[in-house]
Image (cartoon, grey):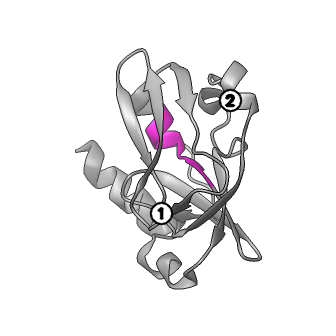
Amino acid sequence: MEIREGLYYSEDHEWVRVEGDNAYIGISDFAQEHLGDIVFVETPDLDSEFEAGAVIGVIESVKAVSDMHTPVSGKVIAVNEALEDSPETLNKDPYEQHIAVLEMSNRADLDKLMNSTDYAAFCAGEAE
């Protein structure tokens, strides 16, 4: 299982990469491994606004249907449209395939997320 440094992680296994005021959000390698083969991704609507923890989409795999939460508050300014035709790319390289980009409205949301070291320990605890 890969955990990349320099990202923020949520307990729901989403990652956040911050570029300026923008938060790129995707699912971790841990998440895609546990979901299995991903067959469908529902992305949020552009210009939708969400509070941290809100459901912003759905990820469907051969095993389950899972809600995708946003770890940060903000407005959706972009989505990864390529996932409509190729949702399985989340399985191949989950850290290169963001699902949505939010313009953050509260940078303090990042303080509630884990760094790579803390996330590795969190995942180890979930695997027990």
Camera-nearest residue between 118 and 57: 57
Q: Amino acid at mark 2?
A: Leu
Q: Quadrant of the C terminus?
A: top left
Residue 22: mark: none
Please say if 73 is above or below 46: below
Please say if 7 is above or below 110: above
How many callouts does the rendering have? Answer: 2
Please say if 12 is above or below 113: above
Determine crowd level at label 2: few under 14, some 14-19, many 20+ residues with C-alpha closer than 10 A: some
Which residue shows up at 71% across the image and 19% down it? 85
Residue 16's image quarter?
bottom right
Q: Earlier in the sequence, mark 2 or mark 1?
A: 1
Q: Residue furthest top?
A: 62
Find residue 119 and report its horizontal and vertical position in percent. 43, 61
Residue tagged 1: 71
Residue tagged 2: 83
Element at badge 1?
loop
Find residue 61 and report its horizontal and vertical position in percent. 45, 21
Which residue shows up at 67% across the image and 46% down it? 98
Element at badge 2?
helix
Q: Residue furthest front?
A: 47
Camera-nearest residue between 105 and 26: 105
Which residue shows up at 39% across the image and 62% down it? 53
Q: Is residue 111 magenta?
A: no
Horizontal relation, residue 91 to residue 64: left or right? right
Q: Is residue 30 magenta?
A: yes
Horizontal relation, residue 9 to residue 87: left or right? left
Determine crowd level at label 1: few under 14, some 14-19, many 20+ residues with C-alpha closer than 10 A: many
Specify the segment rendered in magenta.
Answer: 25-32
